[in-house]
């Protein structure tokens, strides 16, 4: 039987989500309103806890519509008036950019995340960062978040395990639809695959992703993501059997069901695969092209 062309078959294109919604007794969401082919309807920002002061997880990119909806969502959906602190999955702009709006609306709050390894990206928060790392526990009334270090999409990436629900806030590690891009400059596919496999050791029943809808079949989705990347690797090796190709040449062979305007992003993930294969001694690089060893 021939292999499928892809494992993850859904897409962010055309997805719609409400401005804000209650997802569980201790989790509500406010949509970041930064729609796009990779962000779907926008970044999901999460209000977590059951008490009068909640945790805000991620802040979107800093869109006025989100800043307008955040106090409404906090009051009308979460039934609270204040935030206790801000927790960030990573320093990509569509997750950290709204911290300044939170500060303007609610005053200076503690902002916690794993530091980016070099100066620059964390400064987008506009406030000092409290450094946390793998295993840090962050508690508020009704909710306990345990940080899980999951690099690959970004070097500072943390997921957060919500103990009371056996749920995981996955940031950009796993999306509610489609697959995440492994960025050229700061991504690492080997680390990304290790991060996905690490999740299998957790007792996760539900996933709250940074983009797209809630995932209720958590383990199945994690395995699907692993299988998808393993398939892409086999496809890349297959494309190189006929001779050297550049990344876009590979994309045109194996991403035949993906709209052409997404091909440059697909090429980033292909290059991440190729770097992994070079490090494993299975592929060699010739300036802008790659070949099998």
Image (spheres, grey):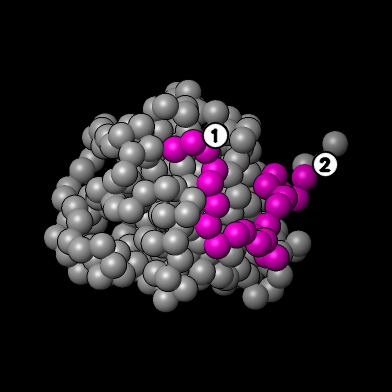
Tell me the mark number nearer the camera, choosing from 2 and 1. Answer: 1
Q: Which x, y percent locates residue 283?
A: 50, 51
Q: Quadrant of the N terminus?
A: top right
The residue at the point 65 percent across, 62 percent down is 16
Q: Is residue 281 above or below residue 68?
A: above
Secondary structure mostly seen in magenta is loop
Residue numbers of the magenta segment: 4-26
Identify residue for label 1.
206
For label 2, the crowd category at 10 Å Cα-Cα, with few meaning under 14, some 14 to 19 and many 20 or more, is few
Identify residue for label 2.
2
Q: Which x, y percent locates residue 94?
A: 41, 65
Q: Which x, y percent locates residue 110?
A: 19, 53
Is residue 15 one of those drawn in magenta? Answer: yes
Disc 2, SS: loop
For label 1, the crowd category at 10 Å Cα-Cα, with few meaning under 14, some 14 to 19 and many 20 or more, is many
The residue at the point 23 percent across, 40 percent down is 133
């Amino acid at each position: 039987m021939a292999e499928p062309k892809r494992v993850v078959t859904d897409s962010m294109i055309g997805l719609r989500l409400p401005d804000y919604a209650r997802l569980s007794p201790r989790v509500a969401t406010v949509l970041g309103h930064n729609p796009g082919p990779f962000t779907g309807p926008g970044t999901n920002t999460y209000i977590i806890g059951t008490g009068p002061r909640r945790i805000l997880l991620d802040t979107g990119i800093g869109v006025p519509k989100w800043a307008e909806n955040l106090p409404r969502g906090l009051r009308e959906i979460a039934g609270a008036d204040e935030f206790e602190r801000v927790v960030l999955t990573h320093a990509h702009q569509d997750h950290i950019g709204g911290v300044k709006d939170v500060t303007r609306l609610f005053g200076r709050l503690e902002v916690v995340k794993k530091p980016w390894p070099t100066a620059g990206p964390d400064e987008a928060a506009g406030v000092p960062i409290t450094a946390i790392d793998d295993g840090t526990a962050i508690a508020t009334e009704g909710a306990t978040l345990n940080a899980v270090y999951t690099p690959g999409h970004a070097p500072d990436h943390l997921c957060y395990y919500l103990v009371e629900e056996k749920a995981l806030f996955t940031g950009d590690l796993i999306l509610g639809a489609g697959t995440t891009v492994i960025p050229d400059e700061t991504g690492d596919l080997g680390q990304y695959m290790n991060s996905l496999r690490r999740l299998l050791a957790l007792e996760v029943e539900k996933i709250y992703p940074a983009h797209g809808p809630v995932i209720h079949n958590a383990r199945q989705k994690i395995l699907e993501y692993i299988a998808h990347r393993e398939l892409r690797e086999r496809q890349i090796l297959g494309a190189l059997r006929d001779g050297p190709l550049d990344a876009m040449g590979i994309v045109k062979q194996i991403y035949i069901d993906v709209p052409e305007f997404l091909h440059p992003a697909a090429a980033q993930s292909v290059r991440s695969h190729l770097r992994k294969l070079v490090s494993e001694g299975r592929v060699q690089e010739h300036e802008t092209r790659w070949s099998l060893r």
